[in-house]
Image: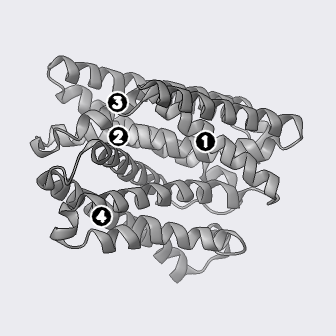
Amino acid sequence: MTRGMRRLSSAAVLVGAAALLFGFVTGRRPLVLALLDASFLFCAGVAAGGVALSASVRLAFGGWAGPLLPAAEGLVDFLLPALGLLVVLVLEGAAWKPRPLSAGLAIRDLGGGLLLFLAARWYVTRRRRGEPIGAPAVIYLLLYAAVLSTWAVDLVLDLGPWAPSTVVPAYYFMSALLAGLAWATLQILARERGEGDPELHHDAGKLVFGLVCFWGYLLFAGYLPVWYENLPDETGFLLARWHGAFRPLSLLTLAATGLVPFAILLTEWAKRRRALLAAGTASVLVGVLVECLLLVLPSLPLQASATGGVLGAGVLVGSLGLVFWFAPPP
């Protein structure tokens, strides 16, 4: 990490810590912890999704992605700090969750996170040493799906009074995989000079495009049964995100994660263009970030305010600062 990047990351972490502290001392603990939950879901999801991308591509012998995967594997170093954020969310559960986690569920979330980190570290270490990675990669991918599904249940679905949507766990861990791919691709593009490697761009763009389409399929799979059943216990989760200030955010998520990258990366020519691929992947990251906010905030009885917006931005900046501190660009 360059000295400038380290200073910027340190400043971001201090901003996040100050936002949390200010929220605690001014009686806004539920708000800042809910925002920390959304930030955790995004940052931990990107990190875990990046390692899952590496494991799945290497298991499939995807040699084309060789230049891309080190950036994805570098995210492994953030998983342990992410576990620290999860500890805060669990210990302070009574301050922000309608139904605080029981001891058993807390152990499940924290224990699962620890196992995920250990499996990720095992896989990446063996890969960097040139040792066989078959078993570590498979174990990590299984834990990835299980642990992120558990987080989706306990940190998203358990917040609202509505009937849980069974598609949300898969929707979350696939969104995290898409975000991990977008993060790694954007880092590689930032390091290139000129037009870079059009063939790598084309292959990465095809994978981004395919995962964007699958993201849209999962979103529609969550919406369609709710629409045709029209049961109040099931429609509440969606309607809460389609009213007030959350409606523009929902539209932004649909556009940034789905429509924009789909339109940009539809043609082979566009996938080969460095600037267009960067625009598509950046749009995906913005969309998934807003999506994590929408997974959490509408389910809680929080009052919107300018102060809350500033605190939320501070918590998010601090979380991203942690990512860049522990998993800097390669």
| Residue at (42% x, 70% y) in the render | 221
Amino acid carrying label 3: it is: Gly
Sequence-wise, the earlier of marks 4 and 2 is 2
Give the foreground label among 4 and 2.
Answer: 4
C-alpha gap between disc 2 and disc 3: 8 Å
What numbered label is drawn on residue 279? none
What residue is disc 3 on?
Answer: 74
> Is there a contact, CB below 8 Å, between mark 1 and mark 3?
no
C-alpha gap between disc 3 and disc 4: 24 Å
Judge from the rendering whether residue 16 lies leftward or rightward of residue 65; answer left or right.
right
Give the foreground label among 4 and 1.
Answer: 4
Sequence-wise, the earlier of marks 1 and 2 is 2
Residue 91 vs 94, above or below: the answer is: above
What residue is disc 1 on?
Answer: 317
- The residue closer to the viewer here, 138 or 45, is 45
> Is there a contact, CB below 8 Å, between mark 2 and mark 3?
yes
Sequence-wise, the earlier of marks 2 and 3 is 2
Amino acid carrying label 2: it is: Gly
